[in-house]
């Protein structure tokens, strides 16, 4: 695993992000580095958007990686890819929608590259998945949930993530590049699979 200078996973401040962006600015295509004022404006816009939507990156990192070091690696890689491709964001859709696609595509590639857990089987629509800010009484429930998620394959993780983000079947299909019917079928199967994993762990929501 490569050495990294990293923005700590849960201490993602604008100052740290700015330092990080400065370090990776050389990754931008030459054509996008010629105008320093333009690049500075781009950077400020990017930092503000990341600050407002950084929860997406936290969730994707936790969904795909089961230990803190790997989560930090993935978190760094997602920010890197977002910054490298930021000039392609034209504002035709919401930033969060574009961010979902970049973050998930990055996670899928990263997941395969790291050769993490192979395919192994959710949550019914009415299941209450606790928010991470709800307090200590929900920590055990979250722990079981994330442990179960680690046994899903990369596509299934993406399906569950987008489902928990409140996306419709149509939105999920668009983000994953599959048909709406396929998204619905795959999501239902993944929910059943995840529910079985949770039960096998001896825990039920």
Image: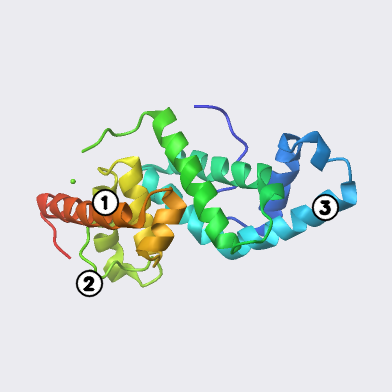
At 43% from the left edge and 48% from the top edge, which residue is drawn?
177
- Residue 66, x across and y down, in percent: 35, 43
Q: Are marks 2 and 3 in contact (CB under 8 Å)?
A: no
Quadrant of res 12:
bottom right
Label annotation for residue 186: 1
Which of 49 and 141 lies nearest the eye of the viewer?
Answer: 49
Quadrant of the image containing the C terminus: bottom left
In front: label 1 or label 2: 1
Label 3 Cα crowd, 10 Å radius (few <14 / some 14-19 / many 20+): few
At 59% from the left edge and 64% from the top edge, which residue is drawn?
94
At 56% from the left edge and 55% from the top edge, which residue is drawn?
98
Q: Which residue carries the number 2 mark?
A: 126
Label 1 Cα crowd, 10 Å radius (few <14 / some 14-19 / many 20+): some
- Residue 120, x across and y down, in percent: 20, 38
In the rendered structure, which disc, 2 or 3, sits on the residue that comes first in sequence? Answer: 3
From the viewer's perspective, is residue 41 above or below residue 104?
A: below
In front: label 3 or label 1: 1
Q: Is disc 2 placed on a helix, strand or loop?
A: loop
- Residue 190, x across and y down, in percent: 23, 52
Which of 163 and 202 lies nearest the eye of the viewer?
Answer: 163
In the rendered structure, which disc, 3 or 1, sits on the residue that comes first in sequence? Answer: 3
Label 2 Cα crowd, 10 Å radius (few <14 / some 14-19 / many 20+): few
Left or right: where 173 falls relative to 34? left
Colour mode of the rendering: rainbow
From the viewer's perspective, is residue 58 above or below residue 124?
A: above
Q: Is disc 3 placed on a helix, strand or loop?
A: helix
At 40% from the left edge and 62% from the top edge, which residue is drawn?
170
Q: Is residue 9 visible?
A: no
Q: Which residue carries the number 3 mark?
A: 40
């Amino acid at each position: 695993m490569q050495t990294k200078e990293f923005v700590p996973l849960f201490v993602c401040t604008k100052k740290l992000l700015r330092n990080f962006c400065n370090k990776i600015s050389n990754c931008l295509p030459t054509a996008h580095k010629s105008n320093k004022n333009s690049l500075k404006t781009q950077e400020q816009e990017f930092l503000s958007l990341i600050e407002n939507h950084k929860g997406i990156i936290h969730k994707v990192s936790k969904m795909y990686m089961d230990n803190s070091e790997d989560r930090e690696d993935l978190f760094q890689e997602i920010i890197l890819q977002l910054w490298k491709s930021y000039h392609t964001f034209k504002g035709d859709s919401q930033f969060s929608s574009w961010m979902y696609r970049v973050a998930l595509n990055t996670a899928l590639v990263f997941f395969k590259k790291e050769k993490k857990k192979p395919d192994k089987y959710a949550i019914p629509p009415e299941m209450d998945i606790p928010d991470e800010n709800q307090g200590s009484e929900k920590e055990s429930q979250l722990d079981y949930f994330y442990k179960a998620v680690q046994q899903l394959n990369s596509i299934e993780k993406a399906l569950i993530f987008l489902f928990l983000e409140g996306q419709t079947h149509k939105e999920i299909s668009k983000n994953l590049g599959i048909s709406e019917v396929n998204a619905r079928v795959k999501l239902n199967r993944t929910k059943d699979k995840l529910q079985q994993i949770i039960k096998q762990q001896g825990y039920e929501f």
